[in-house]
């Protein structure tokens, strides 16, 4: 019995350490270098802490002093910190509840482009890469005149934040 408990404790400790070293530490280090991130709490870990093909990006809290742009910057900085990883999928959670996901390739692209891509462009086009937990597209892609398209895309970006962490449950 004691041996089983010791083995379980070692296993749990190894899993926690693996998640910390490979994900949490690089993200925490990167986010800690930008004082604007104060007030936003994020936890990153492998899906169920053991599946390395899926990243769980869990937004735990956002202070009243932070904006949607602050939260998105934290997400983008996290993608930069983890850009060397290969994920099939990245779940966007709020307090452990999966609200959206995006393909791992796109997450990697965001991290690779972080230093030079126009953040307004990234904000505008981000929602077209989001899926609901059931696999359906979360938001439509827009076509037409640039002003109308840009307005719709930015409206969707705001709606995404509302559904991710500003309301109790997402709107289907």
Image (spheres, rainbow, N blue to C red):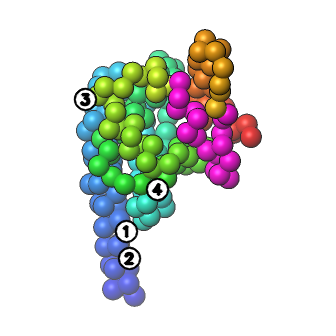
Between discs 3 and 2, the one toward the N terminus: 2
Residue 33: image tag: 3
For label 2, the residue is 8
Q: How far apart are marks 1 and 2 (CA)?
A: 6 Å
Disc 1 secondary structure class? helix
Disc 4 secondary structure class? loop
Magenta stretch, residue numbers: 124-140
Q: How far apart are marks 1 and 3 (CA)?
A: 30 Å
Residue 93: image tag: none
Where residue 75 sits: x, y (%)? Answer: 42, 35
Where residue 3 sits: x, y (%)? Answer: 33, 86
- Name the one closer to the observer, 91 or 156: 156
For label 1, the residue is 12
Label 1 with label 2: CB-CB less than 8 Å: yes
For label 4, the residue is 88
Identity of the residue drawn at 62% across and 19% down: 149
Q: Distance between the residues labelled 2 and 4?
A: 29 Å
């Amino acid at each position: 019995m004691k041996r089983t408990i010791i083995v379980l404790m070692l296993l749990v400790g190894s899993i926690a350490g693996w998640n910390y070293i490979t994900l949490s530490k690089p993200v925490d280090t990167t986010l800690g270098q930008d004082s604007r991130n104060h007030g936003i709490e994020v936890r990153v870990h492998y899906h169920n802490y053991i599946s390395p093909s899926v990243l769980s990006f869990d937004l735990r809290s956002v202070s009243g002093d932070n904006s949607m742009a602050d939260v998105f910057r934290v997400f983008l900085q996290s993608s930069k910190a983890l850009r060397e990883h290969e994920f099939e999928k990245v779940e966007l959670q709020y307090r452990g509840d999966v609200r959206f996901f995006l393909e791992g390739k796109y997450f990697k692209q965001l991290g690779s482009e972080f230093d030079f891509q126009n953040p307004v462009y990234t904000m505008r086009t981000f929602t077209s890469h989001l899926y609901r937990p059931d696999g359906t597209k979360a938001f439509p892609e827009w076509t037409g005149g640039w002003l109308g398209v840009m307005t719709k895309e930015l409206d969707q970006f705001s709606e995404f934040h509302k559904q991710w962490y500003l309301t109790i449950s997402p709107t289907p």
